[in-house]
Structure formats: C-alpha cells, structure tokens
Amino acid sequence: MRITSRGRYGLKAMMELAAGGLLKTREISERQKIPQKYLEQIIHSLRKNNLVSSVRGADGGYRLARNPTEITVLEILSALEGDLSIIDRGDSTWDESTGNFWKELDEKIASMLQIPLSDFMESGSRKGELMYYI
C-alpha cells in the first residue's frame, strides 16, 4: 500500500474544511499549497463519495458532508486511492498456509485507519501543529 500525493492532499483539504467550515477551493489551495486544478479533481472525488458537499453561488464553496467525528481517514483515503489492501484478493495463491499473516496485517492497517478525522486532527494539534503525514 502506498499513499500518493492525492491521498495526502485530500487529507489536508478535509482537515482544512473541518477547521474552516465553508471554503472555496482557491482558499484551500492557497492555505495548503495544493495546485488548484489538482485540488478540484480531489474535491470532485470526495464529493462523489459523499464526504464533501457544495454550496452554489457567490458565497458558496465546499464543506464536510458529515461531522468530522463521523468521517474516517480510511474513508477519505479509500475515496481517493481506491483499494488500500496490501494483498491481491484475486490471487489464488493467498491460501491458508501463506496468506493468514498478510490478511491479519491488512486488517490491522485498515483498523488503524478507522480513526475519525477529528481524532486525526487532534493527534497533530496536541503538538501545536496539524499532522499531515501518515
């Protein structure tokens, strides 16, 4: 499993929305140093996965679709990166004798990523800064 810039930027954008309410992509882009065109693609994916909602009009922008306590890091990364599994589930060589370790590892990683966005943000703010890296 590898988290790309798309996933990292998506987490930054989601944290910005959680902290700032209704924001335009330009504002997020400037604050987080994310290329605006790239951010727009990321926001589109987050919207498609019901993690972000939009408000139309001159005073419009984007906001979280749910409370940050109800959105997990796993949901965000899955929406942007696709399947985060470390194993190829379609590969028949993952049998009982060799696959159990990898399946357990995969489950533990998924479990760790089940952290709510609010807790993820809080873990970085305890040190006086937002934690943007996993």
Image (cartoon, helix red, strand yellow):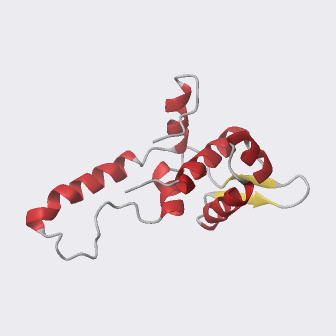
Residue that appears at 70% across and 53% down: 35
Q: Quadrant of residue 46?
A: bottom right
* x and y, in percent, of residue 10 in the image: 59, 52
Split into 4 quadrants, where in the image is the N terminus? bottom left
Residue 24 visible (yes or no): no
Q: In this view, does 54 lie to the left or right of 100?
A: right
Q: Height in image: 67 above or below 44?
A: above
Q: Quadrant of residue 112?
A: top left
* x and y, in percent, of residue 108 in the image: 29, 49
Number of marks drawn: 0
Residue that appears at 50% across and 37% down: 119
* x and y, in percent, of residue 99 in the image: 16, 63
Split into 4 quadrants, where in the image is the C terminus? top left
Residue that sits furthest to the left in the current view: 97
Residue that appears at 65% across and 55% down: 65
* x and y, in percent, of residue 55 in the image: 80, 58
Residue 18 visible (yes or no): yes
Residue that sits furthest to the right in the current view: 58
Q: Height in image: 22 above or below 120?
A: below
Residue that appears at 22% across and 54% down: 104
Q: Is residue 82 left or right of residue 108?
A: right
